[in-house]
Image (spheres, rainbow, N blue to C red):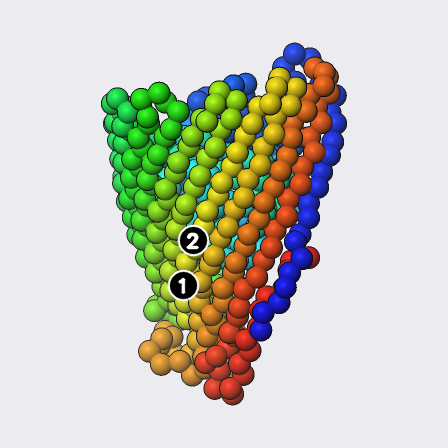
Amino acid sequence: MKKKHLPLLLASMAAMSNQGANAQDSTVVMGEVRISAERAAGPLLSNRVLTSVDLLGADKVEDKNVMNSWELVGQLPGVQLTETRMGAESGKATFRAFNGEGYINGIKVLIDGIPSNVNSGNQRFIDMIFPLEIDYIEVVRGTNDPRYGLHNIGGNINFGTRQGGNYTNSRLTLGSYDTREVQFAVGREEGNLAQNYFIASQQSDEYRGSGSEKYSIGGKWFVTSADKAVKAGLVVRAYKHDAGEPGFLTAAELASDRRQWPAKNGNDRSERDMRHASVHLDWQITPDAFFSNRIYYNSYDDDRRVTFTSNPAGSAPRQRRIWDERQVGYLGNLTWRASELVTLDGGINAEQQDNRYRRMRFSYAMPTDFGAPVLVQNDDTYSLDNVGAYLQAIIRPSASLKIVPGWRADKFSGDSTLMAGDPHGCRTTAGSGSPS
């Protein structure tokens, strides 16, 4: 069944009185970033919008020892890190009264400006990038940024990776729990061609001995026209992570040995594969007009086998959960600096998702035998179609006054087939509704 949907409207208009010569925006910068707040060309920067923006430079990132790159965001003020540390499910960064429990945490994630949330809103695509590849991290808080719709509830985080330059950097890390990590980054820029390559490997026995192995590889190729007005590029990434699931401990188990990996979890594991490809085209039409385009593809495959109890009569499940998600999308943006007083910025986006989620339950065994399920609890297929547009202006009638009107509209639709594999024959197919 299909339904018609009304657009979701977002509008904001505000004025700000700036005090002092350096109060042009509300940006907090930590470290060195290759970005200019007063750049006369290119896209509209986030710090020109009336909201709180934090920037974390590469020198505050590339030398940090973290197991996952989302942990780097914790250096910025007002950020909460929720650590899961269960197999490939590591955790997430949140802010603005949102926490990291469950799936939906209301934070839009972007990598090089490309939407990078899984369908539920989780931040799993961040694991594809490592610190040595990151050029900067930008955090935009609140709802005053109309550029993004889906997941952009409490704000957004953009991980900008290296582009261009000439460098050869490598890093070898040895740590506790037999952790070994290698990162290797190469950049070559000559004439109109820029190339960037990155490869990383990380292995660890982890705190509770379940073991983890992750691998990431990526490449960027960008070509700039002779007059520097047009730049086109291709970005590709691939990531694989295999990890043991140490499971949850009872109070007695915790008191006995907090580092144990119980026998009940002997067959528990996570296997995660993620892929990304995007095509970028930027055009400086005139000195005052800039047009950018992004076409992207994301894929996410996850197979998680987990045991929650060792009691044969216990109600806690022994489950295998499988996610298969595919995203294809487009973002277009036009920035026009009409005068020294007025800047107009607008854009459109479209994203189509095809997803599947399966959950199976298994009988008691020590460890759990994931060979034959006793119940197919979920066998769901669901699509999501999102089309959105926005328009905003930066109006500065005087040095002490900035007016930022903004408007955004989004349409969401899709189809779901839920629990098609339920042995009791429960089957539901319906079109999705508009968000509240």
Looking at this rendering, what residue extends furthest in the bottom direction? 424
Picture coordinates of residue 411, whole percent (x, y): 60, 55
Pointer 1 residue: 324
Residue at 54 percent of width and 83 percent of height: 426
Which element is circle 1 on? strand
User: Which is more toward the observer, 188 or 258?
Assistant: 188
| Quadrant of the image containing the N terminus | bottom right
Residue at 58 percent of width and 69 percent of height: 2
Picture coordinates of residue 84, whole percent (x, y): 49, 53
Q: Which mark is residue 328?
A: 2
Using the rendered view, name the quadrant where residue 346 is placed. top right
Marks 1 and 2 close (CB-CB < 8 Å):
no
Using the rendered view, name the quadrant where residue 323 is placed. bottom left
| Quadrant of the image containing the C terminus | bottom right
Residue 317 visible in the displayed image:
no
Looking at this rendering, what residue extends furthest in the top direction? 21
Looking at this rendering, what residue extends furthest in the front direction? 286
User: Which is more toward the observer, 264 or 5?
Assistant: 5
Relative placement, left or right, of 51 versus 115 is right
Relative placement, left or right, of 145 versus 111 is right
Mark 1 → mark 2, Cα distance in angstroms:
14 Å
Residue 419 visible in the displayed image:
yes
Residue type at the position of mark 2: Val
Total labels: the figure holds 2
Q: Is residue 361 above or below residue 72?
A: below
Residue at 51 percent of width and 74 percent of height: 417
Which element is circle 2 on? strand
User: Which is more toward the observer, 216 or 145?
Assistant: 145
Residue at 31 percent of width and 22 percent of height: 226
Picture coordinates of residue 304, whole percent (x, y): 40, 65
Tag nearer the camera, 1 or 2: 2
